[in-house]
Image (cartoon, rainbow, N blue to C red):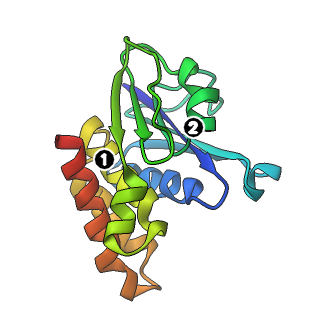
Amino acid sequence: MQHEVMFAGFGGQGILMIGKILAHAALEEGREVAWIPSYGPEMRGGTAYCLVAISDRPIGSPIIKNPRHLVAMNRPSLEKFAAKVKPGGIILINSSLAPDKSGRPDVDELAVPVTDIAKDLGSVRAANIVALGAFVARSGIVSFESIQAAVKEEFAEKQKLIPLEMEALEKGRQAAAK
């Protein structure tokens, strides 16, 4: 089965990073992966996004018009991309910055105040990792152990950040379970 995930938010929220971490975790599980980052003017405060396709068979095309899942880190991203998500998918909303709902009764909607959780942890920059933890816990797209290992590898050169990032993942998992 193929899963497509769109991560979207403001440039600077670590959107491309969490897409890359998810892709890495899936690759380590032996899955086929495509990671398509969006570069350009979006990186300067507009809506930045990336797409990750994960499959147990070769991926026919990395171009995805309608992803199965969406992680929307802000209101503009939710407004722009929620309608494109396939029915039955997951829409994770950063309710700290997007208090609105998607208006999609045909999806599994999960509102998590990821920015507020990250602030409580002492670093708003960890909001993307909180969102990643919540999404992986809810979707089961990769194992939680795989995502933990991928985060540790991503931050291997910044060892002092690893405890914070592990706690951010765990807080995301706990928020998804509520």
Of residue 58 and residue 101, the one placed in the foreground of this image is 101
Residue at image coords 56%, 53%: 15
* Residue placed under numbered mark 1 in the picture: 134
Coordinates of residue 36 in the picture (x, y in percent): 63, 44
Residue type at numbered disc 2: Arg
Coordinates of residue 69 in the picture (x, y in percent): 44, 30
* Residue placed under numbered mark 2 in the picture: 75
Of residue 59 and residue 5, the one placed in the foreground of this image is 5
Q: In this view, does 102 lie to the left or right of 143?
A: right
Q: Is residue 37 above or below residue 163?
A: above
Coordinates of residue 77 in the picture (x, y in percent): 60, 36
Badge 1 element: helix
Between disc 1 and disc 2, the foreground one is 2
Q: Is residue 95 above or below residue 166?
A: above
* Residue at the front extreme, as displayed: 99
Of residue 144 and residue 1, the one placed in the foreground of this image is 144
Q: How many labels does the image show?
A: 2
Mark drawn on residue 176: none
Mark 1 and mark 2: Cα distance apart in space: 18 Å
Q: Is residue 71 above or below residue 57?
A: below
Residue type at numbered disc 1: Ala
Q: Quadrant of residue 74?
A: top right
Q: Name the quarter where the N terminus is drawn.
A: top left
Residue at image coords 38%, 43%: 31
* Residue at the right extreme, as displayed: 41
Badge 2 element: helix
Marks 1/2 in contact by CB < 8 Å: the verdict is no
Q: Name the quarter where the C terminus is drawn.
A: top left
Q: Is residue 125 left or right of residue 51?
A: left
